[in-house]
Amino acid sequence: MSDPSSVAGWFERAYATGRTPWATLSPDQRLVEWARDRPAGGWALVVGCGLGDDAVLLAGLGWEVVAFDVSRSAIQSARGRFPGSQITYLVADGRWPRSPPWSPRGARCSSPGSEGRGSLPRASACPPR
């Protein structure tokens, strides 16, 4: 269990109690628009996946998806909402071990908002090599 005074603890409490006004139960519209203009396939990393909607969108478009969140409750909810999906869900805080549990294949990546907006993307996607 995460330290209740940490950021991870805050998110864990929010997801465990359902107090998540940011969780709209639909994919981020910017990601929907971005994905529409990309060829299907490759791999995607969804950062702060929450309840899984962005990850499911990408998986449905043929991407191999790894999705993580700091909240164990969020990950459990995502798995429960989308049983049988081929998404690799992880509880993680972004500090990866030396060998992450996926293979990015060294491809060049892009993300919604990476075209000069300067925002941290919630999903990054790479085409297959």
Image: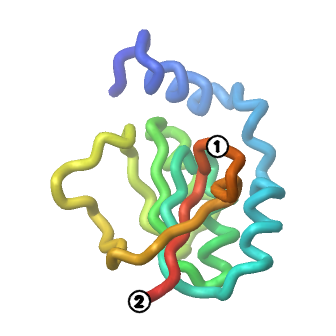
Q: Quadrant of residue 50?
A: top right
Residue 129, label in figure:
2
Residue 105 seen by the camera: yes
Residue 57, by quadrant, is bottom right
Name which of mark 2 and mark 1 comes first in the sequence: 1
Type of residue at label 1? Gly
> Circle 2 sits in a helix, a strand or a loop, which is it?
loop
Q: Secondary structure at mark 1?
A: loop
Residue 113, x across and y down, in percent: 70, 53
The image quadrant of residue 34 is bottom right
| Residue located 80% across and 45% down the image | 24
Q: Is residue 73 above or below residue 116?
A: above
> Which residue corresponds to the image point at 65% horizontal and 42% vertical from the top-left?
119
Q: Which residue is mark 1?
A: 118
Reply above or below: 56 against 63.
above
Q: Where's residue 89, x and y in %?
A: 44, 59
Q: Is residue 125 left or right of residue 32?
A: left
Residue drawn 18% across the image and 60% down it: 99
Does residue 72 appear left or right of residue 1 in this picture? Answer: right
| Residue shown at the point (55%, 74%) measured from the top left | 85
Amino acid residing under circle 2: Arg
Q: Which residue appears farthest toward the top when viewing the image?
A: 5
